[in-house]
C-alpha cells in the first residue's frame, strides 16, 4: 500500500478539474496584492506557482483556504463556491495547508501537533493508521513524539507541519514556500517528498520562490509577478524562461 493510500479520501477521477480559480483580485490596504488571477487545478496533478517575495503567492493561499476574502472573483472546489466560507468550513471539505513558517504549537508535543491535524470530522476515522503512515514518512518524528515541537530544528518542524497536514486526510494540499529558510540539502529532501506525494496521486498546489526545482515537480505551472500571472504552461516548458 502506498504512503498516501491512508492519507487522503477518494476524489474525482484524475484528469478532471478539482479547483477552479477565476478572476481573483485582492486589495491589501491601498495595494492590489492580486489582480485578476485565474487558473485550474486538475485532480491528481501538481500545480506550481512561482514568484519572488510579495508576488502574491501567500495572499492567494490565504484566499483559497478562507483566511482572507478576495475583492472579487470566484474559487470553486468540486464545483462548490469557496469564497465566503470560513477557514474551518473549507478545511472540512478536504483542503489542507502547510503554511509558510509552519505555525506549530511550540509548547505542545510533536504527537499532539500531529493529532490536531485530524480535527476535521472527515479525518477522524482512521486517524491512528494515518499517524502510523506519517511516522513512516518521517521516522525521526517517532523518536521525538513526546518532545515539544518548539524544541525541534527548522527541518524537523517542517516535517511536523507536513505530517499535521496529512493527518487531515486532505484531497488538496497547498504548500506555501515549504523550503523557505532551509538548507539546500533539506530543500532537496522536501522537494523529493512532495514529488513522491504527487506521483502517488495527491493533488498539490506548490507556492515557491525556487523556480527550477519546483517546476520540475509540476504538471502545470504559473509565474506570478506583482499579483498577476504573467506566464503559464507545463512545468518543464517554463524552465528556460528567465521569468521562472
Image (cartoon, rainbow, N blue to C red):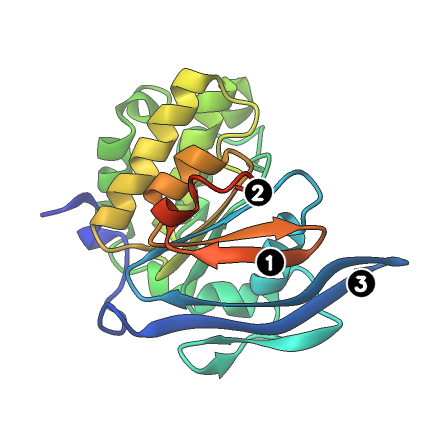
Count numbered badges in the picture. 3
The answer to the question of whether label 3 and label 1 lie on touching residues, with beta carbons closer than 8 A, is no
Image x and y of residue 85, in percent: 60, 74
Looking at the image, residue 230 lies above or below residue 112? below
Mark in the foreground, 2 or 3:
2
Ranked by sequence position, the earlier of labels 2 and 1 is: 1
Q: Is residue 132 left or right of residue 165?
A: left
User: Tag 3, which secondary structure?
Assistant: strand
Residue pointed to by mark 1:
229
Which residue is at a point 35% across and 66% down the rendered structure image? 42
Percent of width and height locating residue 47: 41, 55
Residue 27 - label? 3
Does the residue at mark 2 contact the one at mark 3 (Cβ under 8 Å)? no
Indicate the position of residue 102 as horizontal and vertical percent values: 55, 36
Q: Residues within 10 Å of mark 2 (few under 14, many from 20)?
A: some
The mark nearer the N terminus, 2 or 3, is: 3
Q: Of 190 and 236, which appears nearest the observer?
A: 236
The span from disc 3 to disc 1 (Cα, nearest Å) is 16 Å
Q: Secondary structure at mark 1?
A: strand
Amino acid at each position: 500500500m502506498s504512503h498516501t493510500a491512508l492519507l487522503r479520501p477518494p476524489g474525482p477521477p484524475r484528469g478532471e478539474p478539482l479547483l477552479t480559480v477565476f478572476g481573483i483580485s485582492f486589495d491589501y490596504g491601498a495595494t492590489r496584492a492580486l489582480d485578476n488571477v485565474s487558473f485550474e487545478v486538475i485532480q491528481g496533478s501538481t500545480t506550481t506557482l512561482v514568484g519572488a517575495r510579495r508576488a502574491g503567492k501567500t495572499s492567494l493561499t490565504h484566499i483559497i483556504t478562507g483566511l482572507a476574502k478576495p475583492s472579487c472573483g470566484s474559487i470553486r472546489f468540486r464545483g462548490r463556491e469557496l469564497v465566503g466560507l470560513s477557514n474551518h468550513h473549507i478545511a472540512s471539505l478536504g483542503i489542507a495547508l502547510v503554511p509558510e513558517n509552519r505555525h506549530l504549537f511550540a509548547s505542545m508535543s510533536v504527537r499532539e501537533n500531529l493529532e490536531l491535524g485530524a480535527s476535521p470530522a472527515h479525518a477522524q476515522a482512521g486517524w491512528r493508521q494515518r499517524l502510523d503512515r506519517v511516522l513512516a514518512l518521517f521516522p525521526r518524528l517517532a523518536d521525538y513524539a513526546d518532545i515539544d515541537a518548539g524544541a525541534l530544528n527548522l527541518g524537523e518542524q517542517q516535517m511536523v507541519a507536513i505530517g499535521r497536514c496529512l493527518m487531515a486526510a486532505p484531497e488538496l494540499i497547498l504548500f506555501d514556500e515549504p523550503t523557505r529558510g532551509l538548507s539546500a540539502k533539506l530543500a532537496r529532501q522536501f522537494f523529493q517528498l512532495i514529488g513522491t506525494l504527487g506521483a502517488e496521486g495527491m493533488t498539490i498546489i506548490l507556492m515557491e520562490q525556487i523556480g527550477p526545482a519546483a517546476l520540475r515537480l509540476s504538471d502545470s505551472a504559473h509565474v506570478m509577478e506583482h499579483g498577476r500571472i504573467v506566464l503559464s504552461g507545463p512545468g518543464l516548458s517554463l524552465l528556460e524562461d528567465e521569468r521562472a
